[in-house]
Amino acid sequence: MTPVLRAPLLPAAAGAVCIALAVQIAPVGGIALAVALAGGFTLLALASADRPRRLCWCAAALVASISAVTTLFGPLPGFDLRHAGPLDGLREALAEPLRHLVPEPEGGIVRGIVLGERAAVDADLATAFARSGTSHLLAISGFNMTLVATAVALVARGRVRPAITASLTILCVLVYSVLVGLAPSVARAAVMAVVASLGLAFGRRAATDNALALAVATMVGIDASAIGDVGFLLSATATAGLLYLGEPISRRLHSLPGAIRQGLATTLAATLPTIPIIAAVFGRVSLVSPLANLVAVPLFPPLMLAGAATAVLGTVSPDLAMVPALLAYALASGLRLVVETAAALPLASLAVPDGPLAGLGYGGATALGLFFGPRLTWRGAQAIGGRVRPRRTSGVRPFAGHLFSRRALWASAALGIVLVNAGAALVLWPPPSGIRVRALDVGQGDAFLVELDGRTLLVDGGPDPARLLAELGASLPPWNRRIDVVALTHAHADHAAGLIGVLERYEVGLAIEPVGLNPGAVATAWSDRIARAHVPRRAVAAGARMRVGDATLTVLAPDGDPRVDVPSLVLRVEHGSFSMLFMGDATEQAQADLLLSPASLGARVYVPPHHGAASAYAVPLVAAVRPSAAVISVGAQNRYGHPTPETLAALGRVPTYRTDRDGTVELDQGGNAQLVVRTHANGLPPPRGGFLPHAPPAR
């Protein structure tokens, strides 16, 4: 069967693409080409003797005519489905459980895969996805539509007629497409899913290449600018590669085991046609993409399903969503490990020239390689693999429950049971005894996480909410979404900005701040977020004491001295033989006031004031505290020169740990009273450039 008869809409798609390209170069030339093609296709339709060919050329003439009209008068009127108001509330409602139940940065991955929120993915992690050639997993595509349609088919299987199943599938696909934002790549996948479902409704096998041609012809014919959308180009070319290259590549890899052969063939078939576009637009090509995708792609279906279950159940009850949230977190952690490992390999990606001319060169080279490469042709596969009967590739099975074999379903169910039981065992595992403090590496700012007997205390949050959430996600168990006490020492961005995100994403039992909190934009944001989250709030001063688990939290400052212009909390945490003194940003006057009662300052671990800034009281403070270790939270190569040589000299032989050199510093004291210090405790990369959104005021 000729390509025209197998995919009668192929000429229509080809004509629409040629017109769209011409429009991008010269609109007048595009209109002329559209008119010429419409006339030519009409003549071919009139000259065709048989009905299939006549319908083929009529469709091409219709699309060319529509392209001429839309090019002349603009795209067809309508509303922007990428920002459809009626579903914005639903999208936000579904995203909320994912924000609260799945820690960062895994939470950003899950929201990107389930709801298309690519902006939720941390910038460094997004770069790792790009370097490893796995960015397509974060884009809503045909894979997502397949899973949506398969889920509907599995639920409806055997209960309703195929026509009703197809109607439900189409409805769910359309709603999901609008929910995630109907970008061109999403629209392409939705159109193909609808065509496949219509084939199911009428009892006919769907011609996938014809569905792709219909999607391309419709979108580019209605709006020629769609041809410039990178996501649409990558989606369409990858789908075409799967249709026409998948089986030849699979036959060439006949010596590999079945699962590996199929996975590698699928990856190569989808990747090869997109290389010219990726190279021309981004100027970089991933060299590890086939291997990374071979491991990462199998994690995608269960991750999307677990994330979707978390979002839906979480709108009813967070407790119901806890088990799928743990499963989603585990799968997202595995995906993150694969992506970051692949991106860290030597020569993971290669920088190449970019631009339109380079793209033409890459496209030509790729076309020649695919055309003349005997390993990817049917004849070459026959010569290497022996006599193999060709299989029909013009259609695929409709979206139905049998997309996944019974064996695959049993294996997935067994894996799910194992992971759920493992998660339940972790949840029910008793919390560790003793106390653990982590100086979180948040850049030029302070953030200290104290864990004791199942309770948590967070002192300050650093300057970057995203960085703090990533640090908390790497430091706390994924099921722990509560912080019992959040302490803001003072309202400067390098201590407070990160806490705004914590109040939004975690359940907070109590927020404390100094009496006379310094006013300003940061203090206003802090107050607004506390009010919206309905968090209990308490202003404290010197002499206040409270219990956090079995530990005692004592407030040493502020003491109401009017000479202190910016009151800052000074906190002392005591748990058994362990004690730690947090000086916050105590001014020199506040330090002088504290030294009037030196006995109250004694602590095993000491956090010098103001990130180790110079102070006339540095030496007396160290003498009063008598620490066994000191921790300074500071950004690498910060412009303030912290910590200063004077502070380091005052500490003398006290072991001093710094987050700019040691990353996240963990101090752990168990039942034997021995203090264990670990550097780079959570394995996160350092913050980018000592992020500081608001420069602190001069002091």
Image (cartoon, grey):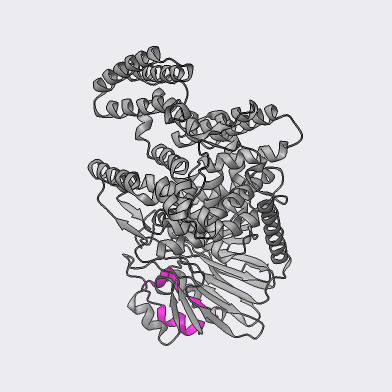
Q: Say which quadrant the C terminus sits in.
A: bottom left
Residue 660, picture quadrant = bottom left
For the point 53% across and 74% down, the residue is: 666
Nearest the viewer among 358 and 250 is 250
Residue 440 x, y percent position in the rendering: 49, 67
Q: Residue at x 60, y 36 (%)?
A: 398
Does 223 appear above or below 36?
below
Report the side of 600 relative to 275 (left or right).
right
Q: Is residue 337 above or below residue 100?
A: below
Q: Which quadrant of the structure image shows residue 484?
A: bottom right
Q: What residue occupies the far right of the structure in this picture?
A: 159
Location of residue 154 in the rendering, given as x and y in whole percent from the top left corner:
69, 40
Asked if residue 185 is among those painted magenta in the image, a careful observer would answer no
Relative to 88, say whether 471 is above or below: below
- In the rendered structure, does residue 622 fall within the stretch colored magenta? yes
Query: Which of these two is toward me, 243 or 614?
Result: 243
- Residue 519 visible in the displayed image: no
- Percent x, y for residue 8? 45, 25
Please tell me which residue is depicted at 55% across the width and 77% down the height of the picture.
667
Q: Tell me the magenta residue range.
A: 602-627
